[in-house]
Amino acid sequence: MSKVKDPSLAPQGELKIEWARVHMPVLRKIQARFEKELPFRGITIGMCMHLEMKTAALGQALKAGGATVAITGSNPLSTQDDVASALAASGAHVYAWKGVNPEEHHENLLRVLGHNPRLVIDDGGELSVSIHTERQQLIPDMIGACEETTTGVHRYRALEKDGLLKYPVIAVNDAYTKYLFDSQHGTGQSALDGVMRATNMLIAGKTVVVGGFGWVGRGIALRAKGFGAKVVVTEVDPVRALEAVMEGYSVMPMKEAAKVGDIFITATGCSQIITSEHFGEMKDGAVLANSGHFDVEVDVKGLRQLAASTRIARQNVEEFKMMDGRRLYLLAEGRLVNLAAADGHPAEVMDMTFADQALCAEYLVKNKGKLQPKVYNVPADIDKTTARLWLETHDIKIDNLSQTQSQYLNSWQ
Ligand SMILES: NC(=O)c1ccc[n+]([C@@H]2O[C@H](COP(=O)([O-])OP(=O)(O)OC[C@H]3O[C@@H](n4cnc5c(N)ncnc54)[C@H](O)[C@@H]3O)[C@@H](O)[C@H]2O)c1
């Protein structure tokens, strides 16, 4: 059972999934093992993730491991309808289409939960928040959940802090083989890709303001610098601000940055980063984009209230004409620009992230009943396995410690 926009798009979507799989050798290797060992036999896995080609490849790997997969999208604009159709045609239960409204999104979450998942793979914590608040009858049989992104990990940790978390969760986002590569290099490349596809603007010579210098922000700053931009960083954490200074970026409050920026990209995971107090300071033609999880970083409602008129200037670009004649351009409704206006992260980095997801899901099943209702870090073995497999599948060899070296490192003398 599925609900997608147009099932006839499946062949086109299957081609995209195949393309992703070609560039995901680690996941292919894990899938081949899953096909033999069937770690998820008899288990339904509920997924709420950006439904594009790499996610579909993960869904198919889990299915190959014996799981029944039920999935919905984690963002209204990131679902690719052809990929959703192809995944449905391959036997998953898919409830997703591009442009869902909030009510439809909520219905789709409940449709996924209607399949009684015992494992959840979340991107933003949405399925688990629904289980904890609206579908508590699922809790006794839950094996656990894996969380994909920083914002979701914050939500799970908040549930745990309040003593309300009811099953074990693995913070997949916090694996080295996730945030060092996916958050940093994946988002760095794809957020710039989204801005460039949406605007077709030259980055060289522009001032790019990056909100937040976390793993995502530093990736965006690095790629913007690589394209020849002057990069300005805004931060609230003094250590991260200091890192940005030492990397050679200008650091200043958003109120100051608002006056000099040509392109703004937020990536804080916080809310109200660019608001009415900043729109009035901005240059004519400034471009506003967000790469943080939720569409709360640019105050779109405030922008709409200030505008004299709006129009769609290009696909994924809305023009806001201000009372004084200046035009501000909002990309992808202030939602994740890399997924809404481009194809999300390159498959090579998602190969690591989704290898972590697949291995963490397997770990939860293997340790069923032994884990507490807590947020766990990714076991170091899994992180190392993913890194080792990635190097192996790219034919990159490294040195091994000799016995003498091992002894040296483990000695206090
Ligand atoms: N677009 C994507 O595909 C993608 C990929 C990974 C993560 N994310 C999302 O991106 C966001 C950031 O993730 P991260 O892993 O970099 O998190 P992080 O915690 O490493 O970094 C966030 C940074 O923002 C700073 N910050 C917080 N509030 C701020 C404010 N008001 N003004 C300025 N700076 C502020 C923090 O001090 C921190 O340094 C999260 O919402 C995450 O879920 C998106």
Image (cartoon, grey):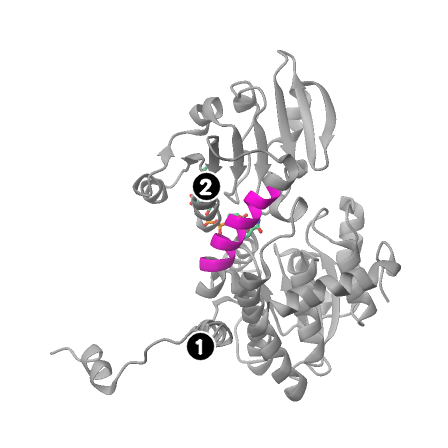
Q: Tell which of 196 and 110 is nearer to you.
A: 196
Question: Dot 2: few (<14), some (14–19), or many (≥20) neighbours within 10 Å?
Answer: many
Note whether ligand 1 is within 8 Å of mark 1: no
Image quarter of residue 101: top right
Image quarter of residue 37: bottom right
The residue stretch that appears in magenta: 180-194
Q: Tell which of 299 and 248 is nearer to you.
A: 248
Task: Inspect the image, locate mark 2, and give the three-letter code of the amino acid beneath it.
Answer: Gly
Q: Tell which of 162 and 192 is nearer to you.
A: 192
Q: CA distance from mark 1 to mark 2?
A: 31 Å
Q: Residue furthest top?
A: 324
Q: Residue at x 72, y 36 (%)?
A: 315
Q: Residue at x 32, y 80 (%)?
A: 400
Task: Inspect the image, locate mark 1, and give the three-letter code of the amino acid beneath it.
Answer: Asp
Q: Residue at x 79, y 63 (%)?
A: 94
Asked if 189 appears above or below 210 in the picture, the reply is below
The disc placed on residue 381 is: 1
Instruction: Say what secondary structure mark 1 lies in.
Output: helix
Percent x, y for residue 406?
Answer: 24, 82
Percent x, y for residue 354?
Answer: 58, 67
